[in-house]
Image: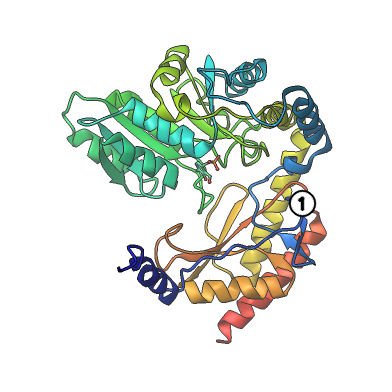
Amino acid sequence: MEDPLHWIKEELDLIRDKKLFRVLTELQSGQSPEIIIEGKCYILLASNNYLGLTTDPKVKEAARRALEKYGTGSGGSRLVSGSTDLHRELEERIADFKKTEAAILFSSGYLANMGTISALVGPGDIIYSDELNHASIIDGCRLSHAEVKIYKHSDIEHLSSLLSLDKSRNKKLIATDTVFSMDGDLAPVPELVELAEKYGCMLMIDEAHATGVLGKRGSGATEYFGVEDRVPIVMGTLSKAVGSLGGYVAGSRKLIDFLRNRARTYIFDTSLPASSLAASLVAIDIIEFEPERRKHLWYLIEKFKSGLKNIGLNVLPSYSAVIPVLVGDAQPALDFARTLRDNGVFTPAVRPPSVPPGKCRIRAALMATHKEEHIEIALRAFKVAHDSLLNL
Ligand SMILES: Cc1ncc(COP(=O)(O)O)c(C=O)c1O
């Protein structure tokens, strides 16, 4: 009998032919500026741990204490037995941090986007989605079975023309990353707010890469743009600058009550373990009350970006800790990453489907725990990689 999985080999061969086959790199250490791979030390320039909080002593101690008190797992979904005082406390803390009435936790940012979008809109409704939105927004759109209209990246005129053509009285939702995950640039949030208000459209933003990095208190793009009271659906994740695990949506009490009753990725999913919740609680305090970490991060961002530009690299115009260097096709991007690694820097090449074909890149990500000397070593490695690309 023929193996019913025989087609997989052909698919894999195709992926390999296109230089898109992905392999895992095993780290033998935590998300520190210096990591160990196969026993060798490298500078880590690819982590979303933007403020270095995954390894912060206060954060780790909080997680340890919660682990002792509550154990390793939560044992159930929130609506059955998996809701603790820590879940409530963290939801209240997130609402306070994002200046909203309430917040709801999910097990990840991915599940927050999937569950929220599919709860808010359905068949007959319309979603306006930025062409560079994260996969979890795209999958939430797909799951909702609403009509999806994709607007050109951050193009307010294009979005405006799409909105003006729609006469339907059904629900409408604009969904966008605030800091785009692979480009690091910032969505025009105030203009999106204006459009949403003008057309009576729901607006949902994803603060995954903005939280901890943007705003005086580090709460994200709504704070940075001064529109905290004008974005009705604010999603984020606890897995990046917050340094632990989980996703959330912050908004009005009625929105949160609705999601608790309708978001399937909330209802039918085991809740977060106590250690992650306790870590997030302390991490959010650090983000808000220790702005010097963010200040140092921004100092490094500016230094690194100007160094890359001096080398002559094609640095995309980001405004975050995500600094993309455009290379082009998959093989040169892989070669570039290999040269970086040979020169002591770990940051893998990003290829489709994470980015469009022909736009492969090195997505460098900085952390507040990097020291200036890490940046200097990294810049030297980028120079070698750039020179060897030119000499091909
Ligand atoms: C913009 C954006 N949204 C959502 C997510 C998903 O978050 P999480 O990793 O917590 O599932 C990510 C993470 O990769 C992201 O970059």
Tell me if residue 46 comes above or below residue 177 in the rendering: below
Tell me if residue 216 comes above or below residue 133 in the rendering: above
Q: Quadrant of residue 34?
A: bottom right
Residue displayed at 53% across by 21% down: 78
SS at mark 1 in the image: loop
Q: Position of residue 102 (x, y in %)?
A: 53, 16
Q: Position of residue 105 (x, y in %)?
A: 55, 26
Q: Position of residue 378 (x, y in %)?
A: 72, 65
Q: From this viewpoint, is residue 221 visible?
A: no
Q: From this viewpoint, is residue 286 visible?
A: yes
* Foreground residue among 118 and 166: 118
Residue displayed at 71% across by 56% down: 303
Q: To which residue does mark 1 refer?
A: 32
Tell me if residue 18 comes above or below residue 282 in the rendering: below
Would residue 132 appear left or right of 310 to someone viewing this image?
A: left
**Which quarter of the image is occupied by the C terminus?**
bottom right
For the view shown, which residue lies furthest in the bottom direction? 392
For the view shown, which residue lies furthest in the front direction? 1
**How many marks overall?**
1
Q: Position of residue 57 (x, y in %)?
A: 83, 37
Label 1 CA crowd tier, 10 Å (few <14, some 14–19, many 20+): many
Q: Quadrant of residue 7?
A: bottom left
* Foreground residue among 385 and 90: 90
What amino acid is at disc 1?
A: Ser
Tell me if residue 200 comes above or below residue 220 in the rendering: above
